[in-house]
Amino acid sequence: MTRLTEDVIWGVPDDKMDLDGRLMKATGKTVKGIALEAAGLDMDDYDLSRFTAAAVPVTSGLGIIGGFAKSVDAITARLGMRSYVTESTDVAGFAEAVGKGTDIIMMSDDPMFISYNTLERKYTDNSWGTAMGYAVCLKNAAKGVEGKDVLVVGSGRVGTWATKILIGWGANVTVTDIIHEKAEALTSLGAKAERNVEKAVSDNTLLINAAPYIIPGEIIAQGSIISSPGVPHYYDLEGRTRCKAIIHDPLEIGTAVMAVNSAAYTIKKEMRS
């Protein structure tokens, strides 16, 4: 997982970014609506108040990211879950959440962020959650991606998942990466690999930027829709002017998808019974 910093997520707990408003304008859906679709739940809304969620602060590796657990807690609360931050950290925090009968436990160390459903003993990880969330955002903003050309910038964990998801939806996916061999490896999934990053950006209007790549505005095609989970995030004035939509947040979309998808393990099981 890309390591966030306190200054990047400062506005998440109090929703200072008005993400729902921005997503409604770009995609026609709220964060919760995106997360429900990402989790494969074909419904406009769902009452998630039956689920309790705990954010466990983790101190291993590089240590706690200031405001991270508080931000995760706020995100799950906005989804309607009964949410809290554990008093203890690390394994003790996980044990605290289990002891309280918590349904969904959210915790992250340096390489991995997961949402664990204690009822079904299954988890959702951030790489898939972020890729799926931003792919769903792009699909809605573009009014569908089947048969359309989509560029994925970056072939790390999120970019690889995004490539798989988009191909599964019938998109014609091109992947570009500054390490061309990484992009080339995804041709086995049915994607095309483009060596020239700037050419790839200029030739496409539907993009997922899953890389720490600041795209110069002068190479962005007019009317582009960019679903942009990559950190650092920055688009210059020319780029913002050329784009029809730029979809980004530092944490919420991926986290919401993780939490709802974990709850969906239980919801879908009940639907089948």
Image: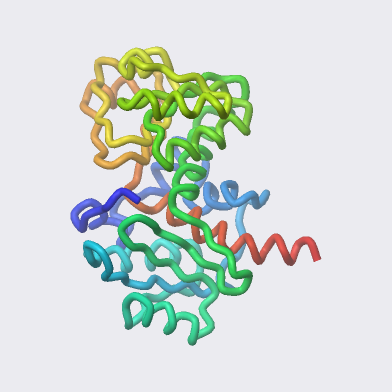
- Answer whether residue 198 is visible to the viewer in this image: yes
Residue drawn at (24%, 22%), measured in percent from left and top? Answer: 216
Q: Quadrant of residue 56?
A: bottom left
Say if 108 sits above or below 39 in the image.
below
Residue in the foreground of this view, choosing between 192 and 254: 192
Q: Position of residue 254 (x, y in %)?
A: 43, 51
Say if 238 sits above or below 120 in the image.
above
Q: Position of residue 146 (x, y in %)?
A: 62, 25
- Answer whether residue 221 is visible to the viewer in this image: no
Q: Position of residue 97 (x, y in %)?
A: 45, 80
Image quarter in which the C terminus is found: bottom right
Residue drawn at (49%, 33%), measured in percent from left and top? Answer: 138
Residue in the foreground of this view, choosing between 189 and 65: 189
Seen as rendered, the residue at the extreme right is: 273
Q: Is residue 53 left or right of residue 71?
A: right
Residue drawn at (57%, 47%), measured in percent from left and top? Answer: 38
Residue in the foreground of this view, choosing between 73 and 101: 101
